[in-house]
Image (tube, rainbow, N blue to C red):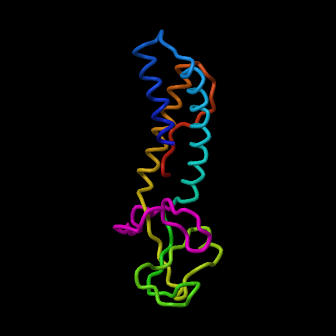
Amino acid sequence: MKSHASRVKEFLSRSLSEPSSSSLDTCDSVPRVANELRKLIRLFDDVLLEGYSDDHDSLFLPNHIGDNPTCNYCGASLFLSYFNCAGVCFDLETDSPRMDMSIRVCAGCYVEGRSCACKDMTPKRIRSFSHALQERNDAASVLSNYSASCSVQADDLGEITER
């Protein structure tokens, strides 16, 4: 989403400084990128809605949970938050003690009743919800500016807030 927004923003800044210059590549690719950005913002809205919690900023933020953390049950990428084993549990496949990494469970799996062996799961966050929301709103603003500059009628993705 951020890279698409950057490309559209770059196009807007170039078209303002050089209004008469237009390459075939720009004419063909920018509307496509803007359309993809619109779709990405809608998808990101779904991700934000699924990961929203009233007290998200109060959840513990671990120093490091590795690159691209995933749910130990379904394999889904963890984006904003997850449930984490509060104790020392056993590996689900070998029943051996896990000393270096406790079990992480996505919200969907947790709601379905999946847990660790000790069943003592606590919510944790990976990144700031407010920061992710700001990135979404920045992308929507760029898309809105693009639509206005091209006199294109677009559905309003507007800014959204946490409440």
Quarter of the rendering containing residue 110: bottom right
> Depth check: 128 or 161 in front?
128
Q: Pick out the residue farthest to the right.
A: 112
The image position of residue 13, as x and y in percent, is: 42, 22
Extent of the magenta region: 53-80
| Figure label count | 0
Q: Is residue 19 above or below residue 11?
A: above
**What residue sits 60% from the left and 23% below the top?**
28
Residue 157: percent from left, percent from top: 57, 37
Image position of 85 with respect to 60: above or below: below
Q: Is residue 44 above or below residue 53?
A: above
Name above or below for residue 33 compared with residue 104.
Answer: above
Task: Name the residue rendered at 53%, 16% in the picture.
Answer: 23
Q: Residue drawn 43% across and 78% down?
A: 101
Query: Where's residue 103, x and y in %?
Result: 50, 78
Quarter of the view holding residue 14 = top left
141 vs 117, nearest the viewer: 117
Chief SS of the magenta region? loop
In the image, is 49 to the left or to the right of 15? Answer: right
- Residue placed farthest to the left in the image? 63
* Residue 55 x %, y %: 45, 64
Does the stretch in magenta take in 77?
yes
Residue 17 on the magenta span: no
Please name the residue shown 41% across and 57% down the image: 128
